[in-house]
Image (cartoon, rainbow, N blue to C red):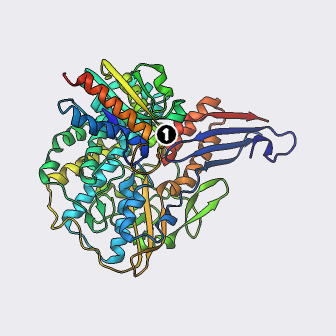
Amino acid sequence: MTGKDIPVRAGLKTRRIDVGYLARVEGEGALMVDVVDGELRDVQLKIFEPPRFFEAFLQGRELTEAPDITARICGICPVAYMMSAVHALEAMLGIRPDEGIRRLRRLLYCGEWIESHVLHIYMLHAPDFLGFDDAITLAREHPDVVKRGLRMKKAGNDIVKLLGGREIHPINVRVGGFYKIPEVAVFNALLDELKWARDAAAETVFWAAGLDIPNMHRDYEFVALRHDSDYPFSEGRIVSSRGLDIAMAQYPNHFSERQVPHSNALHSVRTPGNTPYFVGPMARYNLNRDRLSNATRNLACEVGFDRTVDNPFESIVVRALEVFQAFDEAIRLIDDFIVPARAAEVVPAGGGVGMAATEAPRGLLFHRYEVGEDGLITLANIVPPTSQNQLTIEQDLHELVAGNLHLAESELTVLCEQAIRNYDPCISCATHFLKLQLRHG
Amino acid sequence: MTVGNSYRGDDGVGPYVFSRLSEALPGLDLVASDGEVSGLIAAFQGCDELLLIDAVDAVGAGLCPGSVIWLEANDPALADVGLRASTHAMGVAEAIALARSLGSLPDRFTVIAIAGACFGQGQGLSADVMAAADRLVAELSGRYGHA
């Protein structure tokens, strides 16, 4: 649709905000805002990247191949895709790896959260708050800040590389455990840098909390995993801020995906009301603050975040708190290392239906598999966090634009971009390349 | 420093050169990278002189496959040469720009770009690219062999 296509009565003024392309790499999208006679008519976050057919690729493949195939869905959060696949298939087959494997999986997850969150905080989101076009110009004015972020990210990379075999698209994860367990001494060699990074993460929390954060509050339904004792990575029940409390396998009964004409990404909604919901760091934080380590809770108190966070622009602080939590837990996991009895449990023959959700850096990631008795996958369904947040992002933008129509074109563009990045969607890597076009009727 | 992915056709020229140089010049300080930005910038630090060898897309750069071009890191053409980007749209060119902003570029920093023809999935270099890589290894061996 172009500006000329907007159906309006004669004499009304139309204004279209056309945020061109959220393009390259992890997704391609655009933002379209239509205003008629000073009134906001429509906001659409368009994801027009062609479908990638991963669920179809999985059909007919051995169940043991699922982690390595699904890892290729994302270069930033491959661990989450691998672990959702592994947990779904292990649930189906009744495999229960020992505590040593469980802890190593949590350590791997710590590494991925650190890599992803630090990249987003320092390289993608911080320039919005500080008035820079990108991280490169930010680095000229604040080199020490960017150096801190790069070194922290590398510390996360080193965890994933050690345990996963390489930084991007790890190759050491399998159904039942790992292909190989590194020696304890190699983990211990990371400790000094991880301790530096934990201190740097605390500095990051104070720095993020001191940014000039736009004020916006909405009444969201937050959805995340909740575990009996730990901050959630890949175990527990699915809970919401409006009373939902279900086993992972009940997910299809309470959520559904629907197609919308303007996006190639499916929109997820809560059923039966077809209402939007919110997944990601803020949801995890609000539903699991009592599961944070004492050190993280104390830090949160110091910056005034011992409360429910309902301003999406404050997500940068919550992400920073999760980075601290991840470094804190990584150090604890290495200090209390338990050598697994074996690298992987035996994968028994058989099929069935397996479902699991884990907490990707961007939020809940649900996998469901149907497997034949021959061990071949017959059906796969993958619900990533970005599609679950898409409707919520549109509603944030709707409220934000409606309240800021008086702003100049450039200011409104910056605000829209920043609001999209609050969710760190996979398309966020390219949103610094947005071009805004305003059309007046 | 070499950059590349040996499972993506001619993007594997960096790892190929790494392997050849490791044999030819065992005393040379060599680093292999997959192009991840924080790792690149960490590796830049502490270097007086750095040669970075990476593949470029011949079509995008307007070069014949197998062409080899040497560029100083401050050459404006670097932004246009089309070095293969890693995930999330940041690659060697962005790492160099970021390191420059941070004041952590080596004093002498040369990018050696080898134009490739095929970057699809699978191992193996095309003939022109392998020949160019072998010539480059010979040249670097002659230059640094007695260092």
Mark 1 residue type: Ala
**Closest to the observer: A68 or B70?**
B70
x, y (%) of residue A399? 60, 45
Relative vertical location of residue A38 with respect to residue A145 in this rendering, above or below: below
Q: Is residue A208 left or right of residue B59?
A: left
x, y (%) of residue B72? 39, 20
Q: Residues within 10 Å of mark 1 (few under 14, many from 20)?
A: many
**Closest to the observer: A211 or B55?**
B55
Q: Residue at x 15, y 44 (%)?
A: A189
Relative vertical location of residue B66 with respect to residue A220 in this rendering, above or below: above
x, y (%) of residue A341? 15, 67
**Closest to the observer: A404 or A1?**
A1
Chain letter of disc 1 in the image: B
- Label 1, on which residue? B117
Q: Residue at x 29, y 37 (%)?
A: B18
Query: Is any part of residue A359 visible from this angle?
Result: no
Q: Residue furthest right?
A: A10
x, y (%) of residue A212? 45, 32
**Location of the C terminus of chain B (image quadrant):** top left
Q: Is residue B18 left or right of residue A368?
A: left
**Location of the N terminus of chain B (image quadrant):** top left
Query: Is any part of residue A118 visible from this angle?
Result: yes
SS assignment at label 1: loop
**Number of marks in the rendered image:** 1
